[in-house]
């Protein structure tokens, strides 16, 4: 069993990575392997809605997003991590997730999902809510902790002093491991994840 943890901060070893390391610690305690993938510090193009990915299974922008596709397909759980920029997720992670989730190359249904955010002071809840939207539109059960998944500090050294935040992250990892194991046990017992009722799309303006 595997979980893919995505570091959407431009700082590889910053507060977001620290939060993900504690999530990974909880996952390991629960018997699930965790892999942290950094999106990098270079600008990432946004989705152009060209729909080429629907034919090829890859994005026309050949960067880290295409590297994430096979990793996401293999994973039983996904954790998206981001710093808070102007009460929202980072530009890198927003561009990457828009493209990754739009490709149609990953079957997200039934994969456990969670998001974590790091901030200096405020805006965490808004960014947290933004990231959770990817899960609620793709049939992914959302994993929670015992508080909203946020950590506070302007540097990793400061974030290390946020004992409640670190405990929240570790608990999140434990909870995700438990859910992943429960989903696997259900599938092994013959309880498959339900398919879509229909694929109808209704536009509000006609």
Image (cartoon, grey):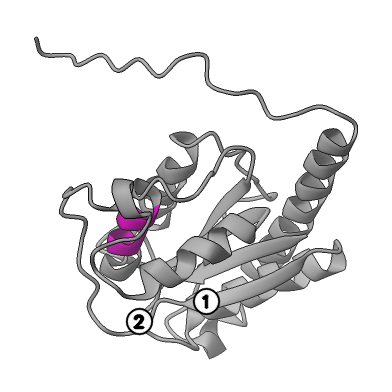
Tell me if 202 is positioned left or right of 112 in this view: left
Q: Which residues are magenta?
A: 94-100
Residue farthest along the top direction in this orientation: 206
- Give the x, y percent position of residue 3: 67, 62
Query: Split into 4 quadrants, where in the image is the C terminus?
Result: top left
- Asked which secondary structure carries label 1, the reply is strand
- Asked which secondary structure carries label 2, the reply is loop
Closer to the chain start, of discs 1 and 2, is 2
Magenta-drawn stretch, dominant element (helix, strand or loop)? helix
Tell me if 39 is positioned left or right of 177 in this view: left
Tell me if residue 79 can be seen.
Answer: no
Q: Residue at x 82, y 44 (%)?
A: 184
Tell me if 59 is positioned left or right of 68 in this view: left
- The foreground one among 141 and 165 is 141
Mark 1, Cα crowd under 10 Å, few <14 / some 14-19 / many 20+, is: some
Q: Residue at x 37, y 83 (%)?
A: 40
The numbered dot on residue 75 is none
- Give the x, y percent position of residue 71: 56, 65
- The foreground one among 25 and 171 is 25
Q: Residue at x 41, y 57 (%)?
A: 124
Query: Split into 4 quadrants, where in the image is the N terminus?
Result: bottom right
- The foreground one among 12 and 194 is 194
Comparing labels 1 and 2, the label whose residue is closer to the camera: 1
Q: Is residue 28 above or below residue 79?
A: below
Q: Which residue is mark 2?
A: 10
The numbered dot on residue 37 is 1
Q: Residue at x 76, y 65 (%)?
A: 27
- Give the x, y percent position of residue 101: 39, 49
Q: Is residue 191 above or below residue 21?
A: above
Q: Is residue 157 magenta?
A: no
Tell me if 123 is positioned left or right of 32 in this view: left
């Amino acid at each position: 069993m595997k979980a893919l943890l995505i570091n959407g901060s431009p700082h590889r070893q910053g507060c977001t990575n620290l939060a993900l390391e504690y999530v990974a610690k909880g996952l390991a305690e629960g018997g699930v392997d965790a892999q942290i993938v950094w999106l990098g510090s270079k600008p990432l193009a946004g989705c152009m809605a060209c729909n080429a990915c629907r034919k090829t299974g890859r994005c026309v922008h050949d960067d880290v997003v295409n590297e994430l596709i096979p990793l996401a397909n293999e994973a039983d759980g996904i954790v998206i991590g981001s710093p808070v920029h102007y009460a929202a997720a980072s530009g890198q992670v927003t561009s990457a997730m828009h493209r990754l989730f739009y490709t149609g190359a990953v079957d997200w249904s039934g994969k456990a999902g969670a998001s974590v955010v790091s901030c200096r002071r405020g805006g965490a809840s808004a960014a947290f809510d933004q990231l959770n939207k990817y899960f609620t539109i793709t049939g992914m059960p959302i994993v929670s902790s015992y508080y909203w998944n946020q950590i506070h500090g302007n540097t990793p050294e400061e974030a290390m002093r946020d004992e409640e935040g670190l405990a929240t992250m570790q608990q999140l990892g434990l909870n995700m491991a438990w859910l992943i194991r429960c989903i696997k046990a259900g599938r092994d017992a013959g309880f498959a994840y339900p398919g879509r009722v229909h694929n109808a799309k209704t536009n509000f303006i006609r």
